Amino acid sequence: MKTFKFTRSIIANMFFAMFLTLLFTTGTLLANSEDVKEAMKKAKSEGIQLVDIIFATKDGKQIKGLTIPVDSLQGSFDNMQATDGSSIPGYGGVTSSDLLLKLDPKTLNSYPDGARSNKYKVGYVLSSVQIDEKKPFPVDKDYQKNMEEAVKQYVQELDKTKTSDKITPVVFSGNDQVKTLDIIIFDLDGSMKIVKTISVDKKNLDEIISDSKSEKGSIHKISFKGMEKELIVKLDANSFRVYPPSMKKNSAYIVGDVLKDNNTPDMANPRNVLKMQIERLQKAVAKETKKNGKEIKDAEVVLGPEVEFFLLDEKGQPIDDRHYFDLLTDPKNRSAKINELMDDLLVQVPQMGIRVEKGHTEVAPGQKEFVLRFDSALRMADNLSFTRKFLTDMSKQYGMNIDFRAKPFNRVYDHIKKEEKKGINGSGQHVHYSVRSASTKENLFHSKDCKYSDIGGSFIEGVLKHQSSMTVVSNPSKNSYFRLVPNAEAPVAVAWADKNRTCSQRSPETGGNPFATRMEIRSPDSTCNFHSFGACLIASGCDGIEKCMKLRPSVGTDNVWKMTKEEKEKKGITPLPGSVEEGIKLFQENCQNNSGLLPKEFVESTVKQITEKLSDSNDPQNQSPGMVTKEGYSANGSSSSH
């Protein structure tokens, strides 16, 4: 009898342990679904527009955070918020540092009016830290208590230093209030260019958009002074956007595709080439999926860029000395207006239909990052180009300058600590990519049986194969290559692995979400033409699918930066180009050896544009990293490329 009772007790304890494991590891939805509903109701009833997701260092004493639009809150509750802990002490190194922030819906609160923002209603929510969807990160036992106390002090400091008790909301324009329409094209460097402005009312604006949707399309011939012939553009109705009110009131824009004299697409224009590669992808995926009896005709590449940049004062000095994931609003430096600029980005740009996922401080002084929520390649390229322009224009309104260069600084003088800081991080533009069905949203990279599906593996291998030769498109200036050096949180060689940030591509943590299966390419920077980058990425992936390439082995947790030349050769790891000149040569050679990869006109115009830009010694993108002295910015500080 005693044996039976003892055995029954063991079994009961086993089931109880299994229950606890299930309870605490199956995610927010199982344990806190009612709490999530209540939190979302609270956010709506209080009119919250932005939310600071707050976590802390391992001891809980130093709070960190990122800011999201309220539209991203439900998804952050459901799937957790993925982030990088590599530059936060105690949260892992560059080879294994993905973190998931698990939000506690019971902690959602609003800041006092005016404390966090004078324009927007902002809330905050506390989170714990996970290694993956099942495993919590081993923080100190007083993590929660210390974090709560630190947050309390932070909110009190904000309330004491606020400049107003009121929120003055931003009023957004609707289509019926639009009075002018800008027709824009994208230059070869990716910047938006207004080629014509039309006065409109609601009736003729509706007619223009309707004509743009027709089979014939809305074609405009535009004359410029000094041009020998007219510019012919075909309007894309899907690109229509109303400008945010802080940027341009009662005005909208629409993108025009550049045509030749015979009204066919000009294949020297990157946007046309991107559209061509999207069609190529659809054919390649349809052919492969038909073999398995499930033909998918509407495949699309989905892109999600993480854009880093520097905010500078009038002397070229970084606008602040915040650290990695420090909260955007600094109660000791309210005059900097950093949070106001980033808040405008996170509220006003989504009002246009461009989904901004989050914003936060980065590693270097004055460095910030925003992330656009994944979208199809063409929409993403259009939207990213506009978002960059929005930040550039709005930063001037706040008395700041913005620098998207890959490596603006080598050294910075800290006016607070009265000392010089060396080894300043550069700015990258990591891009997450996958392939899905446009109609069903099925992720074609995902596989139940292995890391990636056959199509996913082939696409990724194609990108890996061509990455070195395409680097001049993703990193198109002299300055770009001062970032691509060992041990600077940037890749120097072609390899892939899970989570490993020393590789040129890595497979991020998905939190168990099949829709999140993707790859991240880490070499690009923010000076690239994203239409050109997207075209090259898809062309490379299509080459992999069309040739049924097999994905090479992962390098695991090996640190690629520390590998010897012999070790890299043994593993088949090839270097990225060390200069823009080497990049141009590799690009030309690869396109010649793979004649169907990209249109000849595109290759020639890309090389011409980058080469001509190199001849301008006054162009900041051709300069070495500078330094910030006590007096301000000094160009061409000493540095070296690899």
Image: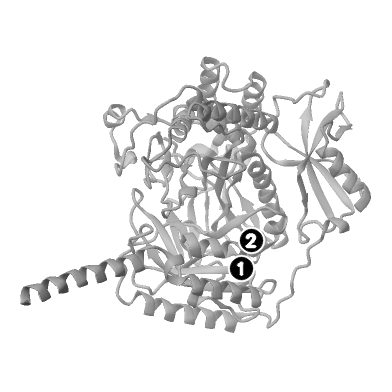
Residue 119 in the image: x percent, y percent? 70, 72
Whole-angstrom CA distance, mark 1 to mark 2, is 8 Å
Q: Is residue 89 left or right of residue 270?
A: left
Residue behind mark 1: 50
| Mark 2, residue position | 346
Q: Is residue 607 above or below residue 438?
A: above
Disc 1 and disc 2 in contact, CB within 8 angstroms: yes
Tell me the quadrant of the picture where the N terminus can be found. bottom left
What residue do we see at 67% from left, 63% from top? 347
Left or right: residue 491 compared with residue 598 = left
- Which residue appears at 65% of the width and 66% of the height? 340
- Image-quadrant location for residue 574: top left
Q: Earlier in the sequence, mark 1 or mark 2?
A: 1
Residue type at mark 1?
Leu
Left/right placement of residue 116 relative to residue 492 reads right
Query: Quick check: 587 above or below 559?
Result: above
Which x, y percent locates residue 417?
45, 67
Number of numbered callouts drawn: 2
